[in-house]
Each structure stands twice: as C-alpha cells, then as structure tokens.
Image: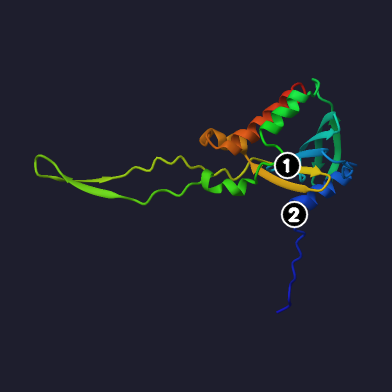
C-alpha cells in the first residue's frame, strides 16, 4: 500500500493575523515607553478569510487614534480592506473606559472555562414516607444554565507594547453573556465591543 502524506498548514492565531496584516499593509507598530496598540480581529463563522473586521486602537504619547477595517475575502483568499474613521472623536475618557474594562490585561476565554461550563453537582436522591404510608423518591434539581455555542464569531485581541506582545480571544461573548451575565470577564469584553461600536456607530 502506498504511503500517503497529508500536509496541513496549521498557523497559530498570531501567525495568521501577522500574515493578514501584511496583506492589509499594516506594519508592526513602533512604540516607545508607555505606548501601546491594540488590534481586535473579528472572525465570523461560515465566511471566507481569517477575519472579516478589525479595530485598531493606538496610544502614542498623548495621541489617541482609532480605525475600523472591513475585510473582504473569497474562496481565493484576501481581496481588500476598507478603512473607516471614527464618527465621533476618541477622547481620554473613552480610553480610560477601555482601561477600566481591563482591555490590556484580560485573560483568554480558556481561563474562565469553569465559569462558563461549571460541573453539575452530583446526583442526590432521598426518600420520604408520606402520611398514607407510601414512599416517595426525591431528586435534587440541577439549576445550572449551561449552553455550548459552537458557531458564530470570535474576537482576537492583540496587545502590542514596547517590551511585550500578547494575544487573547473570546468566542461569542455577546451570546454567552445572555446565559452567564455575572461573569466579569464577559461583561468587560462585551462592554469594550459596545464602546467601539459606539465610536463607529454609523458604519456598523
């Protein structure tokens, strides 16, 4: 029997977005101390391309800037990216809101797995004897509201600073928060996305 070798190109998210950024002619940011750049890639299920939208937030000294890119791809790969400017000014208060939501330090969704999908309690049953002498069996009801969303959209946050690079991701945060409204990390991600949508409110 002939040996068949299957080669798969398995790039990490960082490598995939580096490659896509080059196609979009986005350079790796040159940053000084206390500067940073944040890129938030939006990847939508069942669509061509590694991402369909990108936010770029930049803080250099006291200068704040933001841009939104709508990315078009087809079965042959990347086609073009259209850059959009904010429809309202980006202010220091806006930046402080993002910092308050821990945009630079949020963990990856994997670290809150047990909050999203807590283990159900062990089944427990007990019996009781009713007044008429009959025996009833009771079981503890599991009130965990667990849901698994396998498709939709994911957000990848790339954080660049002068001495550090990190990337973290969340899948379907706006959907999961409906079922898990008390998870702080989800609250922060959804609030960040809502703030950015407001910044580009007429271009969504």
Q: Nearer the viewer, residue 71 or 46?
A: 71
Q: Nearer the viewer, mark 1 or mark 2?
A: 1
**In the picture provided, is 113 more to the left or to the right than 66?**
left
Q: Residues within 10 Å of mark 1 (few under 14, many from 20)?
A: many
Query: Element at badge 1?
Result: strand
Query: Element at badge 2?
Result: loop
Q: Which mark is residue 12?
A: 2
Quarter of the rendering occupied by the N terminus? bottom right
Where residue 50 sits in the image (x, y, percent)?
76, 46
Where residue 7 sits in the image (x, y, percent)?
76, 65
**In the picture provided, is 138 more to the left or to the right than 92?**
left
Whether residue 186 is visible to the viewer of this picture, yes or no, is yes
Whether residue 200 is visible to the viewer of this picture, yes or no, is no
**Dot 1 or dot 2, earlier in sequence:** 2
Q: Which residue is mark 1?
A: 157
Q: From what the image shows, is residue 203 above or below residue 111?
A: above
Please identify the residue farthest to the left as the structure is shown. 132
In which quarter of the view is residue 132 placed? Answer: top left
Quarter of the rendering occupied by the C terminus? top right
Where residue 184 sits in the image (x, y, percent)?
57, 36
The image shows a total of numbered marks equal to 2
Q: Nearer the viewer, residue 36 or 46?
A: 36
Whether pointer 1 and pointer 2 mark residues with C-beta atoms closer than 8 Å, the reply is: no
Where residue 182 sits in the image (x, y, percent)?
52, 34
Please identify the residue farthest to the front as the structure is shown. 33
Residue pictured at 81% horizontal, 43% vertical: 161
**In the picture provided, is 10 more to the left or to the right than 172?**
right
């Amino acid at each position: 029997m002939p040996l068949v070798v299957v080669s798969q190109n398995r790039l990490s998210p960082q490598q995939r977005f580096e490659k896509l950024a080059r196609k979009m002619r986005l350079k790796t940011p040159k940053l000084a101390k206390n500067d940073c750049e944040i890129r938030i890639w939006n990847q939508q299920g069942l669509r061509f391309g590694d991402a369909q939208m990108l936010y770029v937030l930049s803080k250099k000294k006291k200068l704040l800037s933001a841009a939104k890119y709508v990315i078009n791809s087809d079965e042959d790969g990347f086609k073009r990216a259209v850059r959009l400017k904010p429809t309202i000014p980006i202010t220091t208060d806006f930046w402080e809101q993002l910092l308050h939501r821990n945009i630079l330090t949020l963990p990856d969704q994997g670290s809150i797995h047990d909050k999203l999908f807590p283990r159900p309690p062990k089944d427990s049953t007990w019996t009781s004897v009713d007044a008429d002498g009959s025996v009833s069996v009771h079981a503890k009801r599991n009130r965990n509201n667990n849901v698994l969303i396998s498709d939709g959209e994911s957000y990848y946050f790339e954080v660049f600073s002068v001495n550090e690079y990190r990337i973290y991701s969340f899948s379907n945060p706006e959907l999961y928060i409906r079922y898990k409204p008390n998870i702080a990390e989800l609250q922060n991600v959804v609030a960040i996305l809502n703030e950015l949508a407001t910044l580009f409110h007429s271009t969504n």
